[in-house]
Image: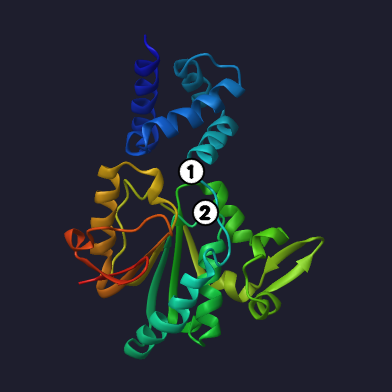
Amino acid sequence: MSDDQDFMRFVERMKHKTDIDLSQYKEAQMKRRLTTLRMKHGYTTFDQYWKALENDKALMNEFLDRMTINVSEFWRNPQRWEVLKDRFLPAMLSANANLKVWSAACSTGEEPYTIAMIMDGLGALQRTKLLATDLDSNVLLKAQQGVYLERALRDVPPTYRDRYFVEQHGAYEVSDKLRRAIQFRQQNLLHDRFDSDFHLIVCRNVMIYFTEEAKHQLYHKFAAALKPGGLLFVGSTEQIFTPAQYGFETADTFFYRRI
C-alpha cells in the first residue's frame, strides 16, 4: 500500500467511526501534522496508528487535540472587537429585546468570554443567549473551567481584566458571572446541523484550515443560521471576496451581514 493509500484509508476509517471528515481540511497541512504525531509514537504507517487509536482512548484524545487547531486569545485583533462593541452591538440591542449569539469553534473559551465581557459591559448580558461550540471535548472542558495563564490576557483592556478575572496561584480565573452566561456544547461544524435565528455568529481563524469546498459549505450554513440582518464576524485572514454568493454583504472589514 502506498503512503497516499495508507493515509486515505485512515481518513475513511476516521470518518466512519467519528464523523470527522479529514478530507475537508487542507490535505498537505493535515497529513503533515498527523504524520508527525504518528511518528512520535513510533508507528510507521497510518494503518498501525489507526489500530492503536481504536484501542487507546488517551491516544484518540491526543489525536483530536492535534487535529483541531486550538489557538485562541482574548480580544484577538482588538480593533475589530472595538468595532463590534461600539458600532454593531449597540445597534442590535436597540432593535432587539434579546440577542442570540454563537461562538463557533470556540477552542479553550477566550472568544466567548470576550463576547460575554462586552455584553456585560453594555449592560446586556442578561438579554443575551450565548452559545459556544467546539469539536474537541477536552478544550471545551478547559473553557468551562475558565482558568488561563497571564499571557492569554495580554490584549484584555485593564478595566475588563480587573472586573472579570481573579488571580489564583499565578493563573487567572474568569468570573462566575461570565461562566454562567455561556452554554458550551460539542459540535462538528462540517457534519452537524446548526441552530438558527442568531443575531451574531463569531467564527474566527478556523476557516483557513478547510478546503475551498468545505468553506463554501460552511458559509452557506452560517448564512442560513443567521437572522436577516445578522452578522458573521470572521478572522483577520479570512476575508470573503464574493459574499453575495452566500447571501451576505460586507458590513465592515471582516464583518458580513446576511441580506
State the image coordinates of residue 6 (x, y, percent, origin top left).
39, 17
Task: Determine crowd level at label 1: few under 14, some 14-19, many 20+ residues with C-alpha closer than 10 A.
Answer: some
State the image coordinates of residue 190 (x, y, percent, origin top left).
32, 46
Q: Residue furthest bottom?
A: 94
Q: Residue furthest right?
A: 169
Q: Residue at x 47, y 80 (%)?
A: 85
Q: Residue at x 51, y 66 (%)?
A: 112
Q: Residue at x 66, y 73 (%)?
A: 175
Question: How many dots with numbers?
Answer: 2
Q: Secondary structure at mark 1?
A: loop
Quarter the N terminus occupies? top left
| Kind of residue indicated by mark 2 | Ser
Examine the rendered structure and indicate whether residue 29 appears above or below residue 53: below
| Kind of residue indicated by mark 1 | Thr
Left or right of 159 on screen, residue 207: left
State the residue position of label 1.
68
State the residue position of label 2.
107
Q: Which numbered circle lies on residue 23?
A: none
Q: Residue furthest top?
A: 1
Dot 1 or dot 2: first in sequence order is 1
Mark 1–mark 2 CB contact (< 8 Å): yes
Nearer the observer, 129 or 150: 150
Task: Determine crowd level at label 2: few under 14, some 14-19, many 20+ residues with C-alpha closer than 10 A.
Answer: many
Examine the rendered structure and indicate whether residue 55 appears above or below residue 66: above
State the image coordinates of residue 192 (x, y, percent, origin top left).
32, 50
Nearer the observer, 91 or 253: 253
